[in-house]
Amino acid sequence: MLDAASFFDLADFSHREIFQGSEYVWDGLVNLKSYMKGLDYSSFRHEELQDGIPLKNHLIYYQGTLQSGENCSFSWDEVGKGKLSVIRDGQLLSGASVIMAGAVIMGQDIQLGKGVLIESGALIKGPAAIGDCTEIRQGAYVRGYCLTGKRCVLGHTTEIKHSIFLNDAKAGHFAYLGDSILGNDANLGAGTKFANLRFLPGNVQVRTDKSVFDTGLRKLGAILGDKAQTGCNSVTNPGTLIGPEGILMPNTTAGSGYHVPRKIIR
């Protein structure tokens, strides 16, 4: 009931080993730092990258190297469908990713997949691993130890810290996610906030109808199963687990604990 397989289909998630051998779904967050420290970031190097300073020019990531975007033309349409287009000297650079001028990178522990777009005004602090065809929009703040699958959206003025996005997970507008996990095709309505720290001392606990589980974590936000959704301006208390296809209605606060699949939280 509280294991990763009860929340997610991990078959196509390229980082599924982060959950391997885990008893509880939140163990993916327990493993996150050590897992990300073992990733290869060596190809994310370029003379125009200055720590914490906005890029002056577009960069592209192509065939395993960061390169200048000079003499390139771009088409930004439908990034999540793999239609980001980069053309240089008349040649289509298939699978190229783009970091737009004005984006801010802090640290060199960044890993990019194919077809990724990082818009002007986004700030990414490493470590971060960004999956194929993911879109990081203007004003997004990626605060470190963030891991995404394919075709994700990290949206405008959305702050994400120590969190995992499975494939097609989207936090498109004005959201906060700390110490949280979004399942495949999970979607957050605008203004969703995941609280991750209790007012009172002690670890975050997860309640079910039969028991109370001590997570061992001082901080734990929300975990949403595959195809779960939140409405606009919704809030979750620390340690909220929403099962697959669950719905948190707009302007609603979800209580801590486990909410069964397909439940509508009002």
Image (cartoon, rainbow, N blue to C red):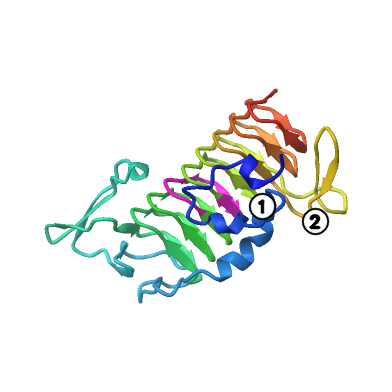
Q: Residue at x 65, y 30 (%)?
A: 261
Residue 142 visible, this angle:
no
Specify whether residue 249 is painted magenta.
no
Q: Which mark is residue 98?
A: none
Q: Residue furthest left?
A: 90
Three-letter amino acid code at the position of disc 1: Asp
Provide residue 263's location: percent of width, then percent of height: 67, 25
Label 1: element kind: loop
Q: Which residues are magenta?
A: 148-164
Q: Which residue is mark 1?
A: 179
Q: Which mark is residue 216?
A: 2
Three-letter amino acid code at the position of disc 2: Gly
Provide residue 19's location: percent of width, then percent of height: 62, 55
Q: Residue at x 39, y 54 (%)?
A: 120
Camera-side residue of 256 and 234: 256
Measure the alpha-carbon separation of dots 2 and 1.
Answer: 13 Å
Provide residue 51's location: percent of width, then percent of height: 48, 72
Q: Which image quadrant for residue 68?
A: bottom left
Q: Is residue 200 above or below residue 207?
A: below
Considering the image in quadrants, where does the N terminus appear? top right
Label 2: element kind: loop
Q: Residues within 10 Å of mark 1 (few under 14, many from 20)?
A: many
Specify whether residue 162 is painted magenta.
yes
Provide residue 255's location: percent of width, then percent of height: 77, 34
Camera-side residue of 20 and 102: 20
Q: Is residue 107 above or below residue 124?
A: below
Dot in front, 2 or 1: 2
Q: Which image quadrant for residue 66?
A: bottom left
Q: Residue at x 65, y 61 (%)?
A: 31
Considering the image in quadrants, where does the C terminus appear? top right
